[in-house]
Image: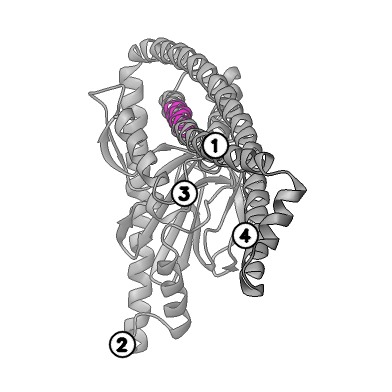
Amino acid sequence: MIRIIKILILLLIMPHCVLSQNSADKVRESREKTLKEIEYANELLLETQGKTKESLNEVNIINHRLSKRKEYLVGLEVEIDVINLAILDNQNSVSVIEKEISEIKKLYGVMVFNLYKNRSGSYRIIYFLASENLNQLYKRIRTIRIYNSFLRKKKKELEELIDELYLKNIELEELRFNKDGLLRKAKSETVVIQKEVNQKRQLITTLRNKQKEIESDIKNKEITARKLESELRRIVEEERKKIKSSGSKERMTPEEKIVSNDFEKNIGKLPWPIQRGIITGQYGEHQHPDYKSVIVRNDGVYISSSVGEGARAIFKGIVSRVFTIPGENYTVIIKHGQYYSLYHNLVNVKVKAGQTVSLKEMIGTVFTNENSKETILYFQIWKETERKDPELWLAPL
């Protein structure tokens, strides 16, 4: 699979740019972004050090980190492949330049030899005086000038090619040095990945004895999700009744239509509901990668973040409802025309129902669990009563 990913990345790079330092820089930029995600996952794991119990979310953070580690390793390997191709390209350029230098040297040598052989001033005078007429004299003078000009031109070309060859060789050595450094990084990264795999195995072994507790936590999350869905459906139904009682045939006002259309146009571009975070619970129903008997079903995504992280509106809209479920923290639902964004597990909520909010406006703080030391926002996007995958709507971090 990793090999396929590498090939795909190379195919994307090759048609758009020459395989050189420029293309290696693009791969490096992507790799460094991945490294920042790994560092952030490490920060989140460090925050849970004072926990009183292990949790499935910790496994999910480690899985995310491992996934990014492998992505980072692929980035290193792709960058090495790009450099290898750039080295090959440079070596071919060097061969072509050396061949051109050799040809110019031969031609230049012949011309210099002829000039040396005919260097006598009296030879040139005789050559000119032997002209039959002025026209022939003019042609002979012009020929000598062209010959001298050509000689100077070839000498300059030779000097420029030698300079170019020197620079190409410097670039080649730099590429080889970079490649050696990347190979060392790749080897050390493989060791780190193995250590983290072992760390995950230990945690999974610990949690395996808590299988019933894990399944109970998942079931409780699903119960919460059903309650949130019920609340949202009630909001939509209430709004439909209001429209019906007013006698209007339109389901949205002109302003709501504009907001709804703008929201729809921004699929894949919307800001995250928190400034920094990683998705540790994906949308949909799927088998947990480490606990095959555990089936996870999410109507939205769980985003793990740092202590004190604020939740923010992903788009302009009107707050439909702020409420709590017994035993849970606050939930805020914001309406964007036909669309709704839902933010669950908040404290210190800063907005109220009916309030207009702007893009990225702070709406509350994400709650941090005292036992697990985890800060997790549960986030959903709906089109009226139709669930949407938030990952498809949010812009890459």
Specify which label sits upstream in the sequence, 3 or 1: 3
Instruction: Determine the secondary structure under disc 3.
Output: loop
Quarter residue 144 falls in: bottom right
User: Which residue is found at the position 36% from the left and 10% from the top?
Assistant: 205
Specify which label sits upstream in the sequence, 1 or 4: 1
Work out whether residue 29 or residue 124 is closer to the camera in this orientation and state it: 124
Residue at image mark 2: 249
Q: Nearer the viewer, mark 1 or mark 2?
A: 1
Give the Cα separation between the discs numbered 1 and 4: 74 Å
| Mark 4 and mark 3 residues within 8 Å of each other at the beta carbon | no
Residue at image mark 1: 106
**Looking at this rendering, what residue extends furthest in the right direction?**
121
Work out whether residue 278 or residue 151 is closer to the camera in this orientation and state it: 151
Give the Cα separation between the discs numbered 3 and 1: 36 Å
The answer to whether residue 282 shows anywhere in this view is: no
Residue 171 in the figure: left or right of residue 9: right
Residue at image mark 3: 17
Q: For residue 312: magenta?
A: no
Work out whether residue 351 or residue 87 is closer to the camera in this orientation and state it: 87
- Indicate the quadrant containing the N terminus: top left, top right, bottom left or bottom right: top left
Give the Cα separation between the discs numbered 4 and 3: 40 Å
| Mark 3 and mark 1 residues within 8 Å of each other at the beta carbon | no
Neighbours of disc 4 within 10 Å: few (<14), some (14-19), many (20+): some
Give the Cα separation between the discs numbered 1 and 2: 89 Å
Q: Nearer the viewer, mark 4 or mark 3?
A: 3
In this picture, which residue range is highlighted in magenta?
69-84
Instruction: Determine the secondary structure under disc 2.
Output: loop
Whole-percent x, y for residue 334 in the image: 49, 62
Specify which label sits upstream in the sequence, 4 or 3: 3
Residue at image mark 4: 361
Instruction: Determine the secondary structure under disc 4.
Output: loop
